[in-house]
């Protein structure tokens, strides 16, 4: 849903609604879930299933955070075109949220118990980035998405070889994240300072390590 023509108060209501839906409801994807050929024939033993579930839980948390980040950045910008760009990216992240939630259920794994905390923290970070100016906000998108790309690439190494279903999802997510980063670069992103990039990586490491278990 585009909020470009809504008042600030109405946009806030939309954001609150999106927040509740991201945390409490079953997300609906606009695109079919990626499917690997013969994925239904792949059998995972119990240790493989647990490992795949933990990794997909981390990916689901990343998508919860993405919902918050893009929602906050859309609120913060005064540029209608950039707001639409953020909202379009958020729509693709909603697909990821739905796909990972679906796969978690198939694996018998739970979502992170700390999702409300992850969402709140990511929303605050996105709001700060957005208030720093559009170029900085876009630079934040680029750095975040590049980090996510590397993270997803590592999961393609760590996921059980037989887990073709999870791999198909992660592959498409990786492609989409690269597209978001490229779009942000074309829109005028500025490169973030090295200390900020390092801090973002450290924060992401804490989140992914914790979400693997909780």
Image (cartoon, rainbow, N blue to C red):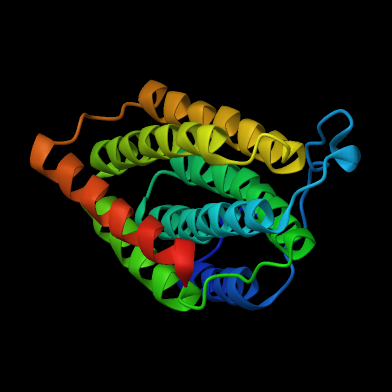
Q: Classify the position of the N terminus by image quarter.
A: bottom right
Instruction: Give the camera-side residue of 33 and 167.
Output: 167
130 vs 52, left or right, is: left
Q: Position of residue 160 (x, y in %)?
A: 63, 40
206 vs 88, left or right, is: left
Instruction: Give the camera-side residue of 160 and 154.
Output: 160
Q: Position of residue 88 (x, y in %)?
A: 60, 42
Residue 20, above or below 130: below
User: Residue at horizontal 34%, vertical 68%?
Assistant: 121
Q: Is residue 51 visible?
A: yes
144 vs 160, left or right, is: left
Q: How many marks?
A: 0
Instruction: Give the camera-side residue of 23 and 76.
Output: 23
Q: Position of residue 31 (x, y in %)?
A: 79, 42
Instruction: Give the camera-side residue of 202 and 74.
Output: 202
Q: Is residue 4 visible?
A: no
Residue 14, above or below 136: below
User: Residue at horizontal 18%, vertical 35%?
Assistant: 192
User: Residue at horizontal 32%, vertical 52%?
Assistant: 204
User: Residue at horizontal 70%, vertical 59%?
Assistant: 46
């Amino acid at each position: 849903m585009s909020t470009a023509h809504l008042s600030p108060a109405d946009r806030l209501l939309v954001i609150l609604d999106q927040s509740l839906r991201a945390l409490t409801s079953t997300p609906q994807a606009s695109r079919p879930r990626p499917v690997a050929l013969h994925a239904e024939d792949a059998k995972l033993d119990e240790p493989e299933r647990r490992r795949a579930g933990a990794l997909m839980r981390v990916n689901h948390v990343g998508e919860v955070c993405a919902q918050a980040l893009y929602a906050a950045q859309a609120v913060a910008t005064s540029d209608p075109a950039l707001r639409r760009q953020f909202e379009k990216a958020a729509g693709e992240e909603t697909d990821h949220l739905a796909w990972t939630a679906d796969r978690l259920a198939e694996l018998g794994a739970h979502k992170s118990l700390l999702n409300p905390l992850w969402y709140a923290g990511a929303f605050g970070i996105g709001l700060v980035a957005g208030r720093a100016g559009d170029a900085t906000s876009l630079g934040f998108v680029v750095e975040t998405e590049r980090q996510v790309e590397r993270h997803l690439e590592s999961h393609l190494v760590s996921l059980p070889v037989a887990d073709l279903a999870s791999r198909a999802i992660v592959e498409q997510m990786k492609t989409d994240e690269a597209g978001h980063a490229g779009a942000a670069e074309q829109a005028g992103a500025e490169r973030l300072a090295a200390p900020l990039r390092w801090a973002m990586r450290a924060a992401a490491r804490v989140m992914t390590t914790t979400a693997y278990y909780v």
